[in-house]
């Protein structure tokens, strides 16, 4: 009997979600944010939580925000369903691993707007968005090429999806323009957030001779290892200097506030529509943290010039000619990689090596 009653109540909530005014019963837009990590720790989840706070400030009196932290992909559907049932009419799913859960919940709540970070599964009430993280990775590669002494760079990678491969390739291409013989050793840990695995991978890469560490993972563990082992590192998604005051050379910063504010306004004003957004340095969605004083002024200037050129569209990290690691030409002279190529990227450029623990 309990199961029948719960089922009826769920149907009532779903119907209400499809018919209720977008701003809720009290005229306030309730916005939910689902994070894979901890908002209190520097990195991916904090970057989204800083943007959540910016939304609450910019739209004070018009919105109410809620965040749910440390949500593993297998629990994402439950988290989003609870947000939808409690009156949230805009939900940001901030991990690509959530896209299946987002699709299922969105189908049951047609009156709720969902913003899925990464992926391609758009529907009438599901939009997708991400950043051109690889643009910052190219600048980091240039800096690494000037700072490495061993010509070995360690790269702690999460999951082999195109977004991560883009970063590895863009970094390596820029690195080898400065140091043609440098190699990038990559360890895949199978997760976007796993402090223990990130630390273990970083330790192993230093043991293999890496004197600069890069990461496409969500915690500060890699920077902490670099600080303790006396090598350089780059922060990811946020400034991690507090964990590596001498190790961090700079960090790639993800700036979601402008996008989140604009999308919340669109719901409030009745202009929201499903779309795909892919922005980068030129649009302010990707930035670099302040440089370490250990980077020579001439290298800082090179990095600034590269960042400016990418922002202005006069430099593309994937401008040809580019061959892959097997010698096959992928991008000819005078051409640049199309977005469709980047969104399916599954090959390495020369200089990239997978290694295992």
Image (cartoon, rainbow, N blue to C red):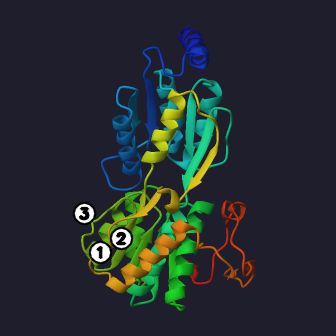
Mark 1 / mark 3, whichever is N-terminal: 3
- Spatial separation of the CA atoms under disc 1 and disc 2: 6 Å
Q: Is residue 175 above or below residue 344?
A: below
Q: Is residue 178 above or below residue 280?
A: below
Q: Secondary structure at mark 3?
A: loop
- Residue 241 found in image quarter: bottom left
- Spatial separation of the CA atoms under disc 2 and disc 3: 12 Å
From this viewpoint, is residue 36 visible? no
Q: Secondary structure at mark 1?
A: loop
* Label 3: how many Cα within 10 Å (few below 14, some 14–19, many 20+): few
| Residue 41 point in image, percent of width and height | 31, 52
Q: Which residue is denoted by mark 2 in the rendering? A: 250
| Residue 286 point in image, percent of width and height | 47, 60
Nearer mark to the viewer, of 2 and 3: 2
Nearer mark to the viewer, of 1 and 3: 1
Q: Residue at x 47, y 71 (%)?
A: 307
Q: Residue at x 39, y 90 (%)?
A: 149
242 or 326, which lies in front?
Answer: 242
CB within 8 Å, label 1 to label 2 = yes
Mark 2 / mark 3, whichever is N-terminal: 3
* Label 1: how many Cα within 10 Å (few below 14, some 14–19, many 20+): some
Mark 1 / mark 2, whichever is N-terminal: 2
118 or 201, which lies in front?
Answer: 118
99 or 275, which lies in front?
Answer: 275
Q: Which residue is denoted by mark 3 in the rendering? A: 242
Q: Residue at x 39, y 45 (%)?
A: 51
CB within 8 Å, label 1 to label 3 = no
Q: Is residue 93 above or below residue 83?
A: below
């Amino acid at each position: 009997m309990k199961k029948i009653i719960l089922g009826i109540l769920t149907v009532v909530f779903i119907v209400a979600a499809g018919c209720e005014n977008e701003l809720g019963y009290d005229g306030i837009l309730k916005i939910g944010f689902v994070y894979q990590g901890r908002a209190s720790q520097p990195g991916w989840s904090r970057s989204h939580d800083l943007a959540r706070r910016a939304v609450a400030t910019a739209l004070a009196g018009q919105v109410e925000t809620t965040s749910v932290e440390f949500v593993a992909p297998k629990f994402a559907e439950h988290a989003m369903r609870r947000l939808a049932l409690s009156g949230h009419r805009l939900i940001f799913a901030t991990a690509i691993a959530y896209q299946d859960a987002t699709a299922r919940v969105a189908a049951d709540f047609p009156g709720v707007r969902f913003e899925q970070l990464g992926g391609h599964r758009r529907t009438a009430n599901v939009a997708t968005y991400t950043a051109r993280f690889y643009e910052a990775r190219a600048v980091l590669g240039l800096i690494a090429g000037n700072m490495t002494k061993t010509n070995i760079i360690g790269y702690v990678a999460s999951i082999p999806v195109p977004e991560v491969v883009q970063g590895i390739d863009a970094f390596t291409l820029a690195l080898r323009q400065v140091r043609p013989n440098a190699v990038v050793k990559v360890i895949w840990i199978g997760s976007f957030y796993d402090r223990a695995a990130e630390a273990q991978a970083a330790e192993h890469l230093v043991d293999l001779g890496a004197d600069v560490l890069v990461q496409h993972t969500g915690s500060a563990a890699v920077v902490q290892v670099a600080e303790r082992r006396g090598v350089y590192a780059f922060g990811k998604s946020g400034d991690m200097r507090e964990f590596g005051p001498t190790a961090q050379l700079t960090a790639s910063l993800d700036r979601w506030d402008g996008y989140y504010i604009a999308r919340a306004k669109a719901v409030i004003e009745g202009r929201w529509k499903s779309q795909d957004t892919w922005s980068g340095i030129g649009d302010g969605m990707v930035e670099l943290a302040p440089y370490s004083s250990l980077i020579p002024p001439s290298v800082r200037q090179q990095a600034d010039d590269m960042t400016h050129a990418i922002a202005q569209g006069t430099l593309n990290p994937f401008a040809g000619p580019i061959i892959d690691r097997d010698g096959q030409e992928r991008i000819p002279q005078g051409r640049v990689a199309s977005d469709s190529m980047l969104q399916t990227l599954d090959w390495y450029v020369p200089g990239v090596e997978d290694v295992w623990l």
